[in-house]
Image (cartoon, rainbow, N blue to C red):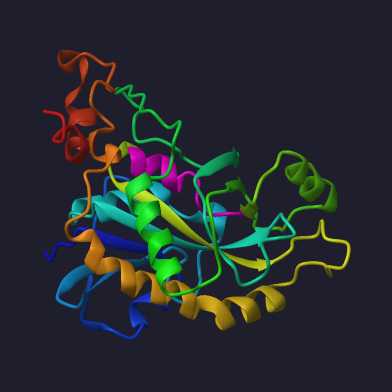
Amino acid sequence: MTRAEIGIIGGSGLYQMAGVDDVSWQSVDTPFGPPSDQIAIGQMGGTPVAFLSRHGRGHRVAPHEINYQANIWALKSIGVKWLVSVSAVGSMREEIAPGDLVMVDQFIDRTRMRKSTFFEGGVAGHVSFADPVCGVLQGALRDAAAALEITHHDGGTYVCIDGPQFSTRAESLLYRSWGVSVVGMTNLPEARLAREAQIAYATIALATDYDCWHESEDEVTVDAVLETVRGNVDKAQRVIRHVIPSLANAGPSKAWTALTNAIMTAPDAIGDGARQRLALLLADIA
C-alpha cells in the first residue's frame, strides 16, 4: 500500500489540481466501515499526498451521513501526519467576504448525530482539545496565503451544525452573538477524531456566502454556494501547492503526542476485541 504523510480532505476535485501527477486509487478497510471514497494518492513535486473526497465522488454523502471515524482511520492507516481540511462555510462577519479564506483556530460543536470518538466499547481515552487546530500547520497555511497575496483571515471560530439544512435566521443571529467567524457542517467531529489519531489538523475555510443573518443577503441557496465555490476553489489549490514543500521538514506538532497519558483504561483491562479494533492507535503509545 502506498503511504503518504500529507493528507487533504475536501472536495472531490482537489486531486485534479495542476501539479498532481501519477494518481493512483486505494481502497482502505477500517474497523468502522468504509470511508467516503477510495483514497487518491498523487505526487506533488515528488512528495506523496493523499486526497480523500469527504462527500465521495459525485457528492453522494450528506454531512450528517459522513463516516468520520472511517475517514480519519483510513488516512491514519496510510501514514498521514498532516491533514489539511478544505471546507465551504458561511461567513458570520461583515469583514469576511464571500470568497475569502479563513484559517480557523477554534470550533463550537452543535452536532448531535455523529460518532465523535474512537475511545468507547472497552477503552476510555481523554485527549486535550483546548486548541483543536495544529498551530504549526495553521501557520504554514497562513504564510502560504500571505505569500500568494490571497485574501485570508488568520484565526477564527467555526461553529459546526449537523445540516443538511442551512441555519434558520434565529440560529444565524444566535451564532453571531457568540462571536463566531464562520458556520459549516463538516469539520466536527473530523477535528476531534484527527486529534485522537494524533494527526496534525488545520482547516482552510472558504466563505461562500454571508449566511442568512445579513440584511442584504438573500436566503442561502445551493446554486449560490456552488457558484462561489467554483469561482474560488483555485485559491485553496494554490495554497495547498505552496504549502506542501514546507511540510517536509516542519514540526513537531503537539498533536503527534496527543495520546500520551490519555488512555485511562488499565492495559490488562482492555479486551481482545477493543485491542484489535484500536490497534492502529494503541500502537502509538505501546
Q: Give the range drawn in magenta.
A: 184-195
The front one of 189 and 46 is 46
The front one of 21 and 248 is 248
Instruction: Classify 215 as above or below 30.
Output: below
* Residue 35 visible to an observer of this rendering: no
The front one of 202 and 21 is 202
Callout count: 0
Instruction: Name the residue at 36% across, 45% down.
Output: 134
Instruction: Give x and y (percent) for residue 225.
Output: 66, 73
Does the stretch in magenta take in 194? yes
Instruction: Name the residue at 13% across, 66% down.
Output: 2
Quadrant of the drawing holding the N terminus: bottom left
In the rendered image, which quarter is residue 182 located in? bottom right
Instruction: Give x and y (percent) for residue 244.
Output: 27, 67
In the rendered image, which quarter is residue 252 located in? top left
Instruction: Give x and y (percent) for residue 107.
Output: 55, 42
Quadrant of the drawing holding the C terminus: top left
Q: In this view, does 276 lie to the left or right of 55?
A: left
Instruction: Give x and y (percent) for residue 166.
Output: 72, 58
Instruction: Classify 121 as above or below 179.
Output: above
Q: Is residue 179 left or right of residue 11?
A: right
Residue furthest to the right: 215
Instruction: Name the residue at 79% across, 42% down.
Output: 174
Does the stretch in magenta take in 99? no
In the rendered image, which quarter is residue 6 located in? bottom left
Q: In this view, does 271 lie to the left or right of 127?
A: left
* Residue 85 visible to an observer of this rendering: yes
Instruction: Name the residue at 20% across, 52% down.
Output: 77
